[in-house]
Amino acid sequence: MLVGASSWSARSLVHDSQWYPRRSMKAAQRIAYYTDRFPIVELDATYRFPPTPDVARQWVERTPAGFLIDIQAWTLLTGSATLPDSLWEDLRVEVRPELRDRRRLYLGHLSHDGRGEAWRRFRHAIQPLVDAGRLGAVILRYPHWLRPGDTGRALMAEARRRLPGLHLAVELRNHHWLEEGERESTLAFLEEEDLAFVCVDSTHGPAVVATTTDLAVVRLLGRNPGDWEEADVPLDERFAYRYSAEELGAWAVTVGQLAGAADEVHVLFANAYRDFAVGNAAQLAELVGAGGPCPR
């Protein structure tokens, strides 16, 4: 069971909290400080822009053996709206000509060859993490507008086909996938495709707790009310939520149950406001007897 936070470099954590002992710390020093306290991190820098092999190698060099990094899949690969500038420049010719001036790019805008090449380059970029044993899981966050159906299932099956041999974890933002009439078929599909289900704690009601592979993933986003999908929702309204001792105690029980059903459990606090995520992660790790630094 591994407990950590969704970032070691979030602006609010670095500049608006006193968790790091000095404001003048370099990135490598902050990473060392973080890995002295947690065995896992989730990195969302890969969500809007795909990583490069050089960046992945830096993560390997700056973290100890045994430390795990869960990365978020690039938006393009999950069918989400994507910044056109995040696509490799030489690959932009693979966007259909009539769609090249759009403000947002989607996977379906690329040619068949371009689509395959985007997946190949993403896999190539994260290969240093794989080779070093640092990659925990690739978290695939599917957009809130993606309703249950063949389109969504095809996207998920494609991810498994394109990234063989890796732990893939699926987060479903559209609640219809997990409603009573769809839940069992959704979970059965994920199990069939060897895709881990991400249990999400958020404002949208009780988390659905289930395991579909030998890896269980929990992401705790905070429980502030409101529509988080609105682009103009300020960061503090979205993530400024500190879990109470009572809420963490309930999750400690649930995480223990997940550990009984899976070989490995990743618990990631994504309430990334000031030191809320790292603080709550340390509290839960103590409750469940997990966390702590990786052995040097």
Image (spheres, rainbow, N blue to C red):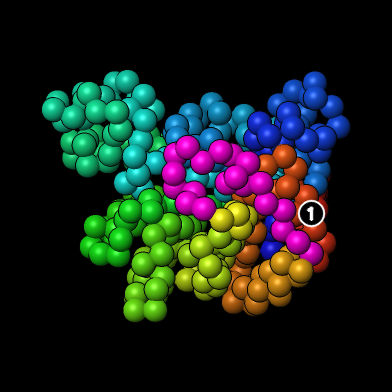
Which residue appears at 82% of the width and 61% of the height? 286
Count the marks: how many?
1
Quadrant in which residue 182 is drawn: bottom left
Image quarter hosting the N terminus: bottom right
- Residue 232 among magenta residues: yes
Which residue appears at 22% of the width and 35% of the height? 110
Measured along the vertical axis of the image, is residue 263 above or below residue 9? below
Which residue appears at 39% of the width and 79% of the height? 180
Image quarter hosting the C terminus: top right
Residue holding disc 1: 282
Q: Going by the image, does 283 lie left or right of 119?
A: right
Measured along the vertical axis of the image, is residue 32 above or below residue 145? above
Where residue 37 appears, as percent x and y from the top left, is: 80, 46
Tell me where the magenta segment starts and ends, as one range: 226-245
Which residue appears at 37% of the width and 71% of the height? 186
Which of 139/98 is in front? Answer: 98
Which of 273/260 is in front? Answer: 273
Where residue 214 appears, as percent x and y from the top left, is: 54, 69
Furthest residue in direction front, as rendered? 226
- Residue 174 among magenta residues: no
- Name the chief secondary structure element in magenta: loop
Which of 42/203 is in front? Answer: 203
